[in-house]
Amino acid sequence: MNSSINRQWRLAARPVGAVKETDFEFTQESVPSPSQGEILVRNIYLSLDPTNRNWASDNSYLSPISIGDVMLGATIGIVEQSNNDAFPKGSIVQGLLQWQDYSITDGSGLTILPNIPSIPLTAHFGLFGHIGLSAYFALLDIGKPNKGETLVVSAAAGAVGSLVGQIGKIKGCHVVGIAGSDEKCRWITDELGFDAAINYKEEYVLDSLTKLCPDGIDVYFDNVGGEILEAVLNLININARLVICGMISQYNNTKPQPGPSNLSNLISKRALMEGFLVLDYMQRANEAIQDLGKWYSEGKLQYRIDLVDGLEQAPSALNKLFDGSNKGKLIIKISDDPSS
């Protein structure tokens, strides 16, 4: 990485279907200098998330990224230059910045990460940060799991889903995960402690859920939408809670897909279906981090990192989230990690 050059991925076109490298343009310019009140951050790690696909489209919950602008992304970086007393030089920061080597910011939305030698920086994406907060608050605040209830999690081997299932076990639930390979199903049952797993690519999901959830489904944590959501709706119990955290099966569709045909089950079962955005919970972050850290130190939580080396790999690596080839939290390493 040349310290005088700032490499960037700029949005070149709205993705149609699967994201293509040609939807982005790899450019470079001189590293900028911060003005008064600003800092220069050298990005170390870039989080790749399904929502990146939505941010590149024109129907995101955020203002859409304009064609020609640098792509947005959650990053962890180090402050190289500072004209802002709140962010001293050398601080390690986390927040929403861009797909580039260096970012200029006034610090809005950034958090200074604590220096804990036993916690690698990647843990702030794999366990803490937006991933851990999503699993924690979406499940506990919306799903409200109770001991003895049945919790079903889709994309259960993903970064969020794998944590959700483990938190469900901590809360005393019978947990069934849905994943896309036998290897992933073995990981969530043998290592993470899920009670059962379904390989949706090899099994008829409704039949398998009927067998594995004989008492019905009390809480469903949805990361995928589509046919799996419809299968779950057939089996929900009275007063079930359905947490809608993502609909990854829909993001690459070129035409709107019909919704589940059985949404009326929400009426007869007096069930709750509620959407979730982690941005609504950032001010409560410490609440989640304390519990997640405690459970991790007690050996009750595990996480897995899928690390890809090189900013230039970002567009192609993003598709790992949609073809199911990622194993754990997908992260791009942009530059040297000073803690390693």
Image: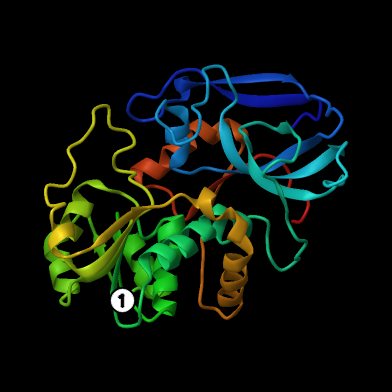
**At which x and y percent is residue 143?**
36, 66
Q: Residues within 10 Å of mark 1 (few under 14, many from 20)?
A: some
Residue at x 44% of width, y 65% of height = 141
Query: Which of the 4 image quarters holds residue 219?
Result: bottom left
Q: Which residue is mark 1?
A: 195
- Answer with the quarter of the image where residue 14 lies: top left
- At mark 1, the secondary structure is loop
Find residue 185 and report its horizontal and vertical position in percent: 32, 64
In which quarter of the view is residue 99 placed? top right
Q: Is residue 168 visible?
A: yes
Is residue 156 left or right of 204 when viewed as pictured?
right
Q: Is residue 101 left or right of residue 61?
A: right
Question: On screen, 199 above or below 103?
Answer: below
Task: In this rendered view, identify the residue nearer to me: 210 or 283.
Answer: 283
Name the one closer to the observer, 86 or 18.
86
Q: Quadrant of the C terminus?
A: bottom right
Residue 285, position in %: x, y? Answer: 60, 60
Seen in the image, is 319 located left or right of residue 278? left
Report the quarter where the N terminus lies: top right
Q: Horizontal and vertical percent for residue 243?
A: 34, 58
- Amino acid type at circle 1 is Asp
Of residue 76 and residue 272, the one placed in the foreground of this image is: 272
